[in-house]
Amino acid sequence: MNRTRLLTTMAVFIAIGTLGSQMLWFPAGVAKAYPVQHAVNVIAAVMLGPGPAVLIAFMIGLLRNMLGLGSLLAFPGGMIGAFFAGYLYKNMGRKSWAAFGEIVGTGIIGALFSVPFAKLLIGTSFGALFFLPPFLVSSISGSLIGLFIVARIKQTEGLHQQMYVAK
């Protein structure tokens, strides 16, 4: 993939993640679940790899915070989840591993990392169990959406490749 196409694809993912997060969300305990971020992480991890997926997650978090649409906790959860999704997909080669990486990365590791992050940057002190349920609910639902979309994209790519071979 050439550089212009990569940057354009990343920009589209950033736009989808930023705007889509405001269109599709639901309450998850004391927090809000934004599954679009996690779906974008899975799709970007499979299509572009761990590096671009982490950068996309960072930019979505940055834009949402600059627009007053998110919290600082979007950074650790989104970026760690994107990295694990991309890393596991790259090393295991299955789309389901990308979804699992997003769930573990955001839902567990990101939630645990948010405890000291929230204390240092936001000034609140919550226990790990405070962040785990909403992070898990959000990452599981978003990862399943992302896995569904990636499966459809891959089927479409396979169909196009078969059509070109048949000609």
Image (cartoon, rainbow, N blue to C red):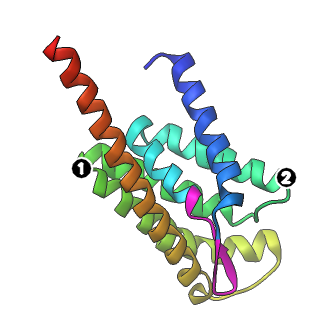
- Left/right of residue 130 with respect to residue 141 in the rendered view: right
Query: Which quadrant of the view contains residue 47?
Result: top left
As for residue 27 lying within the magenta part, the answer is: yes
Quadrant of the image containing the C terminus: top left
Name the one closer to the observer, 152 or 48: 152
Q: Is residue 122 above or below residue 145?
A: below
Q: Start and end of the magenta stretch? A: 26-36
As for residue 117 lying within the magenta part, the answer is: no
Residue 140, position as x, y percentages in the image: 45, 70
For mark 1, give the secondary structure: helix
- Please give the residue where the numbered disc 1 appears in the rendered image: 92
Alpha carbon distance from label 1 to label 2 = 37 Å
Earlier-in-chain disc, 1 versus 2? 2
Spot the residue most to the top. Answer: 167
Checking the image for residue 67, the label placed there is 2
Q: Amino acid at mark 2?
A: Leu
Residue that appears at 44% across and 35% down: 48
Category of crowding for the residue at label 2, using alpha-carbon neighbours closer than 10 angstroms: few (below 14), some (14–19), many (at least 20): few
Residue 139, position as x, y percentages in the image: 50, 68
Q: Amino acid at mark 1?
A: Met
Residue that appears at 80% across and 56% down: 65
Residue that appears at 76% across and 54% down: 64
Residue that appears at 72% across and 59% down: 22
Name the one closer to the observer, 158 or 28: 158
Q: Is residue 62 above or below residue 24?
A: above
- Left/right of residue 37 with respect to residue 18 in the rendered view: left
Q: Is residue 18 above or below residue 76?
A: above
Category of crowding for the residue at label 1, using alpha-carbon neighbours closer than 10 angstroms: few (below 14), some (14–19), many (at least 20): few
Disc 1 + disc 2, Cβ < 8 Å: no
Name the one closer to the observer, 115 or 23: 23
Checking the image for residue 52, the label placed there is none
